[in-house]
């Protein structure tokens, strides 16, 4: 009887630890997104359109990765503002991930953390690292296709890709090209890809 009680207590501790680790991972993901989203500035100018299945957004959007509580956000236009946007977006994304990584590492180093909790935390850290590498790969491939700049942000259910052009509107061919790069680098479908154009 004592043995069964001990097993039950150990099992309850395991469930609680897993719940704590799960909550930490969830809060970290939300913090990364909110930090990235909060830093975006500007007001929308016009509604985007859909070319193929990927959404081409020219400013206004209700995508949860690009706007908050129904408000509309837009990427600044103009070469100087666009360059500043891309630099800030990359910096904010990295700072948010660094903060999330620190939190995960601290939770894993705590006393009494079992092997399963450490494994789950390691998986969250690996997922974050994989996203960082994939975003950089997508950005480099898109720039290699002749676009001036690009920043990508991988979310849980979609990916947003901001592309700077030389002033021309993105065509269906451009959208298809960018979509192809993203779908080859990730498991996202065309319908999960949001492409935002920046002129500059």
Image (cartoon, rainbow, N blue to C red):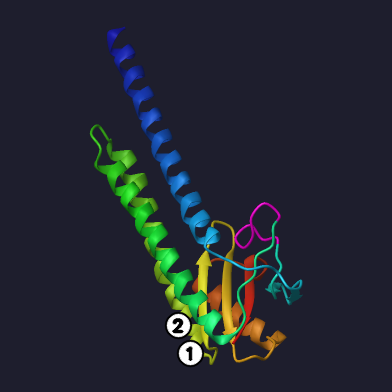
Q: Which segment is the magenta one?
A: 62-70
Is residue 68 shown in magenta?
yes
Q: Say if mark 2 contacts mark 1, CB within 8 Å.
A: yes
* The quarter of the displayed image where residue 94 is located: bottom left
The residue tagged with tag 1: helix, strand or loop?
A: helix
Residue 85 lies, in percent from the top left, at 52, 75
Nearer-the-camera pick, 27 or 6: 27
Residue 44 lies, in percent from the top left, at 70, 69
| Picture layout, residue 1 above or below residue 60 | above
Question: Predominant secondary structure in magenta?
Answer: loop
Look at the image and tell me whether residue 167 can be seen. yes
Residue at numbered disc 2: 140
Q: What residue is shown at x 27% (from left), y 35% (from top)?
A: 113
Give the crowd class for mark 2: few <14, some 14-19, many >=20 residues within 10 Å: some
| Picture layout, residue 28 above or below residue 181 | above
- Disc 2/disc 1 C-alpha distance (Å): 6 Å
The residue tagged with tag 2: helix, strand or loop?
A: helix
Residue at numbered disc 1: 144
Q: What residue is shown at x 44% (from left), y 64% (from top)?
A: 93
Q: What residue is shown at x 34% (from left), y 54% (from top)?
A: 101
Nearer-the-camera pick, 163 or 142: 163
| Picture layout, residue 9 above or below residue 74 | above
Q: Is residue 93 left or right of residue 45?
A: left
Look at the image and tell me whether residue 125 can be seen. no
Q: Is residue 170 left or right of residue 3?
A: right
* The quarter of the displayed image where residue 64 is located: bottom right
Is residue 199 shown in magenta?
no
Give the crowd class for mark 1: few <14, some 14-19, many >=20 residues within 10 Å: few
| Picture layout, residue 170 above or below residue 88 | below
Residue 103 lies, in percent from the top left, at 34, 47
């Amino acid at each position: 009887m004592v043995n069964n009680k001990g097993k039950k207590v150990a099992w309850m501790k395991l469930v609680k630890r897993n719940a704590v680790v799960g909550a930490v991972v969830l809060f970290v993901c939300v913090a990364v997104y909110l930090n990235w989203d909060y830093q975006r500035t500007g007001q929308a100018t016009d509604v985007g359109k859909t070319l193929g299945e990927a959404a081409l957004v020219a400013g206004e959007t209700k995508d949860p990765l690009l706007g908050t509580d129904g408000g509309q956000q837009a990427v600044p236009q103009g070469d100087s503002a666009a360059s500043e946007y891309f630099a800030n977006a990359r910096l904010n994304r990295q700072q948010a991930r660094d903060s999330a990584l620190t939190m995960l590492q601290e939770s894993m180093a705590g006393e009494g953390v079992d092997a399963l909790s450490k494994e789950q935390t390691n998986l969250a850290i690996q997922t974050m690292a994989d996203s960082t590498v994939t975003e950089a790969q997508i950005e480099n491939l898109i720039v290699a296709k002749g676009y001036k700049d690009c920043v990508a942000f991988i979310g849980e259910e979609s990916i947003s890709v901001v592309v700077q052009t030389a002033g021309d509107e993105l065509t269906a061919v451009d959208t298809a090209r960018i979509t192809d790069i993203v779908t080859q680098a990730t498991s996202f479908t065309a319908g999960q890809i949001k492409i935002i154009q920046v002129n500059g």
